[in-house]
Image: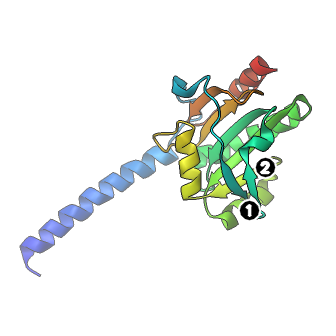
Amino acid sequence: MNKKNVAVITVAIVIFGVIIGNFAVSMFSQTSKPAAEAPSLIGSKLPNYSLLSLDGVRERSEQWLGKIQVINFWATWCPPCKREIPTLIEVQNEFRDHNVQIIGIALDDPRAVEKYVAEIGINYPILVGDDDVVRVSESLGNDMGILPYTVIVNQAGNISFIRYGEVDKETVESEIRKLL
């Protein structure tokens, strides 16, 4: 290999490293400050979807119709996702008797998710997958592929709230109370 080829390859590696590095820094340095709301689907019907649960059962979105749903897309490798899960566990406990259902949808390896769910004690249904999860997330407005991503749906099955990025407990509780 001549010096010109080595230089071209080196430049390509450096550029690739900068791109990957910037992505990693942005992923791991997300603050707990909530991101902007995505209003485009507010008021529209929740699209039907079906995904696998951790025990391999295909779960359908229609089973939660009539409940306030807090649908949270997350992954075990996503620090902001892991920071907000304890909040979602608390919200599920607090609103369990008020017809509220948290639904976690993990874009991740089922074994990693199962291990994490057991470690932290997640008390709400977890659905998991890869391409299927991406399609469902996109159908719910996540056109940027951001995690975490949260959608709140009213009892009639209409989307009432969408948030890119981490969501705090006060916001989730406030949005749920609007629908009670």
Q: Position of residue 5 (x, y in %)?
A: 11, 73
**10 Å neighbourhood of mark 2: few (<14), some, or many (≥20)?**
few
Residue indicated by mark 2: 125
State whether residue 80 is above or below residue 91: below
Q: Using the rendered view, name the quadrant where residue 118 is placed.
A: bottom right
Residue indicated by mark 1: 114
SS assignment at label 2: loop
x 65%, y 47%: residue: 49
Residue type at the position of mark 1? Glu
**Quarter of the image containing the C terminus?**
top right
**Quarter of the image containing the N terminus?**
bottom left
Q: Position of residue 133 (x, y in %)?
A: 59, 52
* 178 and 60: which is toward the camera: 60
Residue 147 appears in the figure: no
Q: Position of residue 38 (x, y in %)?
A: 52, 27
| Colour setup of the view | rainbow
